[in-house]
Amino acid sequence: NAGVTQTPKFQVLKTGQSMTLQCAQDMNHNSMYWYRQDPGMGLRLIYYSASEGTTDKGEVPNGYNVSRLNKREFSLRLESAAPSQTSVYFCASSDTGTGGFYEQFFGPGTRLTVL
Amino acid sequence: KNQVEQSPQSLIILEGKNCTLQCNYTVSPFSNLRWYKQDTGRGPVSLTIMTFSENTKSNGRYTATLDADTKQSSLHITASQLSDSASYICVVSADTGRRALTFGSGTRLQVQP
């Protein structure tokens, strides 16, 4: 039971290049999320998928696209990378708990540098 | 705008000592508050989740308190260990149906031998 896995762990891009960050979970969760974490700031939600087949924008969606490939997998794509997208990216998953609250389980992160 | 403020930003304590981390929030309508531990180079891991009706919750040597009236929470760590060195993040959930979490920027704790 691996939980939430992310690939790659590290990536260096040049400005304008594209790439896709992969995320998979084996906990049979309905919801999945992509966050970015910048120094001195809290995690910020980029996109989320409440259930298979649906996606929605979070707080900072500009410059990103997502695909909920199936219940297990949720990918994040940078079409034309910019230095401002240098960050650590975390994928998370959750299901709906009782009482309307839910616990999110995070992957190990992808450290992305855009030159 | 929903906000979560944590203090101090960083803290150094000696192994075996206790410490308390603070969290103030302005998130409405409030659903729940959680504390996460994030080791360097890893993803956050949940320590506790508290709803409006809970004012204390423990997880081993970690005890979280919540005062929903003053919108404050604290995380108390007793008998600290070297493995407690990490960032501790306060996260507040708004009951908006959009599963929106507001994250604090964290307190970086360093436990020294």
Image (spheres, coloured by chain):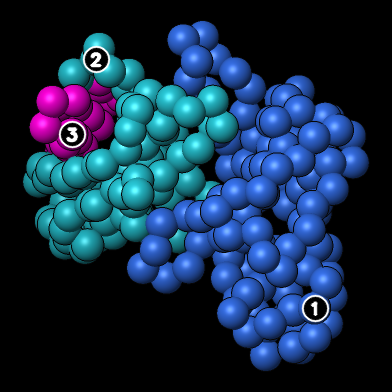
Chain colours: A blue, B cyan
Q: Position of residue A68 (x, y in %)?
A: 84, 41
**Mark 3 neighbour class, 10 Å CA radius: few under 14, some 14 to 19, many 20 or more:** some
* B102 sits to left or right of A61: left
Q: Main secondary structure of the magenta part?
A: strand
Segment tinted magenta in the rendering: B57-80
Find disc 3 in the rendering and name its residue: B71
**Mark 1 neighbour class, 10 Å CA radius: few under 14, some 14 to 19, many 20 or more:** some
Find disc 1 in the rendering and name its residue: A80
Q: Residue at x 83, y 72 (%)?
A: A79
Q: Residue at x 55, y 53 (%)?
A: A59
Dot label at residue A71: none
Q: Residue at x 24, y 52 (%)?
A: B5
Q: Nearer the viewer, residue A6 or B97?
A: B97
- Specify whether residue A55 is painted magenta: no
The correct choice, above or below, for A48 with respect to A30 in the image is: below
Dot label at residue B54: 2
